[in-house]
Image (tube, rainbow, N blue to C red):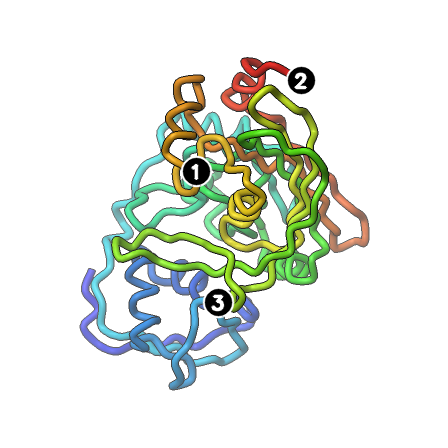
């Protein structure tokens, strides 16, 4: 689909305080995120005639200028197989009139784009025919399994985003890491997201990065690995993976950050996924109650633990 002229979008009340990149991905069906970020970096997308960043929050009546661009035909979406739709329904952990929480499997991206034809949220919208306005509240990595919140109403999305920014939603992860993790530790290290020449996204600890804080404690010690509980107090990309690595412990199956020899060693022992699971969420609700949701650890994670020798 070709848009040959400069166009403008005026932000309405329902989209106030949404991130610019998320808003545009929704509005411009078929626009790859990599292309979107390229347009933003080059200043071809502007808000109120000014250059803007992907994480910029939108205000009422903001004027978003879009350059001429080519979009994929949104009338030809990737189709979620019946088996996937069945699995999505089975993965529902909690549902009310404004929120649904899923136990996302490892290996499926939360949204399409950047070479991904069908993401979890797109599959959800095909599974539930009344769900076209449902939105991701947050993200977890493609390789990570576990709790994923999806809002069913704009009012709930705004509420949960406010809770996330205030650090009131408490997240608990389980991770299997290489080697013996001896004691509980707080990792307070700023993280900087970078991009390699090939376009691969990576994260590193850097003084001029964003504030990042994670609490770790060992749960079960094995002969050559440790199951740790991780509680991130910020929500940076790859935060748990990079903070654990900074303590000398790469996550099992982490093809982005683990050393090649460690990857090879654990693959011979049946590790075929990133051993990171979003185990639980503690969510302040709009009625002042607190919702606790826990995602069962999937079999492709527990089977790895079953083959390890406890100390």
Q: Secondary structure at mark 1?
A: loop
Looking at the image, is 70 positioned above or below residue 296?
below
Along the horizontal axis of the image, is 175 left or right of 129?
right
Query: In this view of the protein, which residue sits in the foreground, 212 or 48?
Result: 212
* Disc on the earlier residue, 1 or 2: 1
Q: Residues within 10 Å of mark 2 (few under 14, many from 20)?
A: few
Label 3 belongs to which residue?
A: 55
Tell me which residue sits at (52%, 71%) in the image: 57
Q: Quadrant of the C terminus?
A: top right
Q: Secondary structure at mark 2?
A: loop
Q: Position of residue 5 (x, y in %)?
A: 21, 76
Q: Residues within 10 Å of mark 3 (few under 14, many from 20)?
A: few
Q: Position of residue 284 (x, y in %)?
A: 75, 51
Q: Position of residue 35 (x, y in %)?
A: 28, 61
* Disc on the earlier residue, 1 or 3: 3
Along the horizontal axis of the image, is 299 left or right of 281?
left
Query: In this view of the protein, which residue sits in the foreground, 278 or 150?
Result: 278
Tell me which residue sits at (50%, 62%) in the image: 206
* Disc on the earlier residue, 2 or 3: 3
Q: Residue furthest bottom?
A: 49
Within the image, what quadrant is residue 1 found in? bottom left
Tell me which residue sits at (58%, 50%) in the image: 151
Within the image, what quadrant is residue 63 found in? bottom left
Q: Position of residue 257 (x, y in %)?
A: 43, 42
What is the C-alpha distance between the residues marked 2 and 3? 45 Å
Residue 258, label in figure: 1
Looking at the image, is 101 positioned above or below residue 221?
below
Label 2 belongs to which residue?
A: 311
Tell me which residue sits at (39%, 18%) in the image: 268
Q: Is residue 125 visible?
A: no
């Amino acid at each position: 689909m070709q848009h040959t002229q400069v166009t403008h979008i005026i932000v309405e009340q329902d989209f106030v305080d949404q991130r610019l990149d998320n808003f545009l991905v929704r509005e411009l069906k078929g626009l790859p995120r990599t292309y979107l970020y390229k347009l933003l970096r080059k200043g071809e997308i502007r808000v109120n005639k000014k250059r803007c960043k992907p994480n910029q929050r939108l205000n009422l009546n903001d004027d978003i200028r879009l350059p001429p661009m080519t979009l994929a035909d949104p009338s030809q979406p990737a189709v979620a197989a019946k088996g996937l739709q069945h699995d999505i329904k089975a993965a529902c952990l909690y549902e009310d009139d404004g929120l649904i929480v899923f136990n996302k499997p490892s290996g499926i991206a939360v949204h399409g784009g950047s070479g991904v034809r069908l993401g979890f949220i797109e599959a959800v919208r095909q599974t539930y025919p009344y769900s076209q306005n449902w939105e991701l509240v947050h993200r977890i990595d493609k390789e990570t399994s576990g709790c994923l919140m999806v809002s069913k109403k704009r009012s709930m999305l705004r509420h949960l985003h406010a809770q996330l920014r205030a650090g009131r939603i408490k997240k608990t992860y389980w991770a299997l890491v290489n080697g013996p993790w001896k004691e509980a530790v707080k990792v307070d290290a700023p993280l900087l997201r970078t991009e390699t020449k090939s376009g691969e996204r990576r994260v590193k600890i850097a003084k001029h990065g964003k504030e990042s804080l994670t609490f770790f404690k060992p749960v079960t010690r094995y002969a050559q690995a440790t199951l740790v509980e991780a509680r991130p107090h910020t929500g940076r990309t790859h935060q748990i993976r990079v903070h654990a690595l900074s303590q000398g412990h790469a996550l099992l199956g982490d093809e982005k950050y683990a050393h090649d020899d460690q990857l090879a060693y654990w693959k011979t022992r049946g590790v075929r996924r990133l051993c990171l699971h979003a185990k639980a969420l503690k969510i302040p609700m709009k009625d002042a109650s607190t919702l606790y949701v826990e995602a069962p650890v999937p079999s492709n994670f527990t089977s790895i633990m079953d083959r390890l020798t406890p100390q």
